[in-house]
Image (tube, helix red, strand yellow):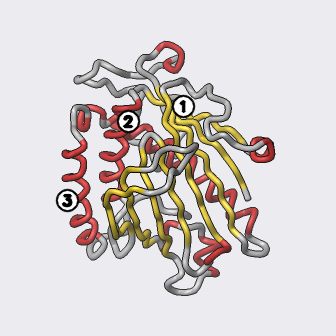
């Protein structure tokens, strides 16, 4: 098992990010869907359950999704996996500011699990053990700071309209972000994303786990850039506005999967 903690620093408040991440999740889902592949939203409804973390976070929104992703997994997996095995299931419990997402694959059963726990705090990524890990887990954990403005992105991911060093928000006056923005920008917050990945396939485990973590870093970086650079589109929205967008997105995704070409982040 690999354990990495990605700390994504953003120039927004924790309250603002709740709206921004949901807005951008809907937009990204549409951009990743087409040509028979992409995201299918099965359920999206409130939940109330046992506390998820540290005796709290017992209520929020539950979503379940199916990712149809033939071209979005590494080529080594595509070559070996039988037909119909390249679907993953996501169960997410969003009790913001804590969220838990578990991704599995029916074909792999207990041999594959990707678990992502996100905690959103109003700091600059300096909380050393936000997820209250045990000493053994801390020894295994690798911390990766993600700077949405200064970290390199793949040429295929770069869009000038999603570049925080060029974006200026008309609504809030924030941006563009300079080289030292993390030291002198307010507001600021951090998404502490604890990712645990286990892929039990003899001869492939280390390589695939590493590829998955590389893909998660790529996703967190591009998603953070998009959230900030779409600030003027979602800033001021309410949760009711977001739920309406999510309902409409579900209908759009069902249609998009039936038409057009494969879209989004494709693995080579």
Are there few (<14), some (14-19), or many (20+) residues within 10 Å of tag 1? some
Residue at screen point 62% across, 74% down: 77
Residue drawn at point x = 58 percent, y = 81 percent: 107
Label 1, label 3: how far apart the Cα atoms are? 32 Å
Quadrant placement of the N terminus: bottom right
Residue 213 in the image: state x and y as whole percent.
Answer: 63, 53
Give neighbour class at mark 2: few <14, some 14-19, many 20+ (Cα, 10 Å): many
CA distance separating discs 2 and 1: 16 Å
208, above or below 97, in the image: below
Q: CA distance from mark 2 to mark 3?
A: 21 Å
Residue bearing mark 3: 248
Viewer-closest of 70 and 43: 43
Q: Which element type, helix, strand or loop, lies under badge 1?
A: strand
Q: At 69% across and 57% down in the image, what residue appears? A: 210
Up the image or down, 160 lies above or below 81; here it is above
**Residue bearing the label numbered 1:** 147
- Most extreme residue toward the bottom is 83
Q: Can you tell which mark lies on residue 17? A: 2
| Sequence-earlier tag: 1 or 3 | 1
Left/right placement of residue 34 relative to residue 197 reads left
Q: Left or right: where does residue 80 sit relative to residue 169? A: right
Question: Between disc 2 and disc 1, whose residue precedes?
Answer: 2
Left or right position of 112 against 65:
right
Q: Which mark is residue 55?
A: none
SS class, disc 3: helix
Q: Position of residue 54 (x, y in %)?
A: 58, 43
Under circle 2, the secondary element is helix
Depth check, mark 1 against mark 3: the one in front is 3
């Amino acid at each position: 098992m690999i354990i990495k903690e990605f700390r994504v620093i953003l120039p927004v408040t924790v309250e603002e990010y709740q709206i921004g991440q949901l807005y951008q999740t809907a937009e990204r889902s549409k951009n990743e869907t087409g040509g028979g592949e992409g995201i299918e939203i099965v359920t999206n409804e409130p939940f109330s359950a046992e506390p998820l973390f540290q005796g709290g976070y017992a209520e929020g929104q539950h979503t379940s999704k199916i990712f149809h992703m033939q071209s979005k997994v590494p080529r080594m997996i595509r070559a070996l996996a039988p037909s119909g095995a390249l679907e993953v299931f996501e169960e997410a419990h969003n009790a913001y500011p804590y969220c838990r997402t578990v991704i599995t694959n029916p074909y792999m059963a207990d041999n594959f699990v990707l678990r992502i726990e996100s905690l959103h705090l109003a700091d600059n990524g300096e909380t050393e053990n936000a997820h209250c890990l045990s000493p053994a887990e801390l020894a295994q954990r690798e911390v990766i700071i993600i700077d949405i403005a200064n970290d390199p992105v793949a040429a295929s991911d770069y869009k000038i309209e999603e570049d925080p060093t060029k974006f200026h928000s008309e609504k809030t006056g924030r941006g563009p972000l300079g080289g030292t923005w993390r030291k002198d920008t307010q507001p600021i917050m951090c998404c502490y994303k604890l990712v645990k990945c286990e892929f039990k396939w003899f001869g492939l485990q280390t390589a695939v786990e590493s590829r998955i973590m590389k893909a998660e870093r790529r996703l967190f970086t591009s998603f953070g850039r998009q959230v900030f650079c779409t600030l003027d589109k979602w800033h001021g929205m309410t949760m009711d506005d977001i739920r309406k967008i999510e309902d409409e997105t579900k209908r759009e995704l069902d249609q998009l999967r039936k038409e057009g070409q494969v879209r989004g982040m494709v693995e080579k």
